[in-house]
Image (cartoon, grey):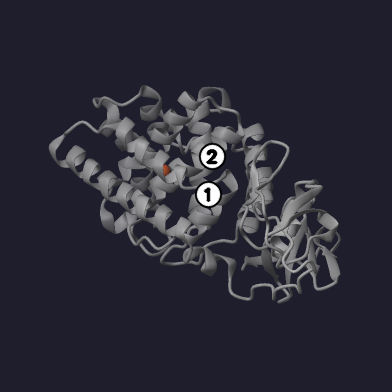
Amino acid sequence: MEIRHIGLNDAVSGMLVAEDVLNDAGQLIFPAEARLTEKAIARMRFHSIAGLSIYAEGGESLPPVEEERESYFEKLRDSEEYVEFNERFDDVVTAFEQEMMKAMKKGINTDGVSMSNGVKKILGTCRSGIQVFDLLHCNRNYEEVIYAHSINVAIISAVLGGWLGFSNNDIDILIQCGLYHDIGKLAIPKKIVDKPGILTPEEYKIMTTHTTKGYNILKNMNVDKRVKLTAMLHHERCDGSGYPLGAVERQIDKYTKVVAIADVYEAMTAPRKYRKARCPFDAIKIFESNGLALFDTKYLMTFLENIAMCYMGYRVKLNDGTIGTIVYMNRQDETRPMIQVGSEYIDLFRSPKLYIEEIL
Ligand SMILES: [Fe+2]
């Protein structure tokens, strides 16, 4: 079939793409042999893609395909990529649980390196940091919260470490820090950890001890000392308001600072028995309103900017029920992008009463 190069302005939903579309950094924006959607075109526009190669099927421009009404995430859940991601995720959850049971009951040393290799295999199924968040979003059906949460935090920490320019060695350590950060919860009564509601002050006090308990579990194990420290310090906050020590910014190491952000984001955006998952834009808003004094500012801003970009081109529902597509991110406020609704545009930055309620 003839291949034609076209400008992005001539790209139409439904065209069959002939070559991978990459941005200036070499990151894959859209794969070859797939058909364009409005969402894909919006994402290319955002990445300043000038043009792309398509197969000239019949020489005419194709009629636009009906933009999918099925949720993007429902489609993703049916994809081979997700199936592979989910299989590897399940394998790591099982291996991690067995490893931790051996460690807790028999005092057998945990093998942090082999556990982190499992997480790297999960990451290997994802084409980009952006796609990791899509796949994680689909993968929220784990009843048991400690292991799945820990693996998610390890994955998010690795991606954030990459965005921050951490070395591969540092990212390996970050993965282990994420995996083991909440390990102390295994030493907290299950009825408190799994309580489907707000903890009483006494229960909360017991729960806070998972930091020191985690450190003590790992203390005599053959695990990197930075991993042990993260278990102890991941609830410390830069303004000194955290626990167990009330440590301040300069006393918290960079690995713990990354894991702290990943931990809070994961907890906010994961569903719990007593509440729905928060919309990522809601989580970003909460971080922007309350997080700047609590977390490392540079790390947090890098995280929020990149996370918001992940949702470029997504269909979203606004609080007034309007459904549209994110077509432009607002640098002044990542939670208030430009939304395209049919041929109209809504600038959320200039529409203070509207906000994104749900990603579809
Ligand atoms: Fe924790």
Q: Locate residue 18: give its quadrant.
A: bottom right
Q: Is residue 191 left or right of residue 316?
A: left
- What residue is at 70 percent from the left and 68 percent from the top? 14
Q: Earlier in the sequence, mark 1 or mark 2?
A: 1
Circle 1 is placed at which residue position? 132
Up/down of 138 relative to 182, above or below:
below
Residue nearer the viewer, 127 or 191: 127
Residue drawn at (54%, 39%) of the image: 159
Decide: is 346 above or below 163: below
Q: Find residue 309 and report its horizontal and vertical position in percent.
A: 68, 49
Q: Residue 43 location, x and y as percent?
A: 72, 54
SS state under label 2: helix
Q: Mark 1–mark 2 contact, CB under 8 Å?
A: yes
Quadrant including the N terminus:
bottom right
Q: Amino acid at mark 2?
A: Val
Tell me the SS state at disc 1: helix
- Choose between 338 and 59: the one closer to the eye: 59
Check disc 2 and report the residue beneath it. 159
- Characterize the local packing of mark 2: few (<14), some (14-19) or many (20 or more) Cα atoms within 10 angstroms: many
Question: Badge 1: few (under 14), some or many (20 or more) residues near its Cα, within 10 Å?
Answer: many
Judge from the rendering whether residue 118 lies leftward or rightward of residue 341; answer left or right.
left
Disc 1 marks which amino acid?
Val
Residue 108 makes an appearance in the image: yes
The extreme left residue here reads 106
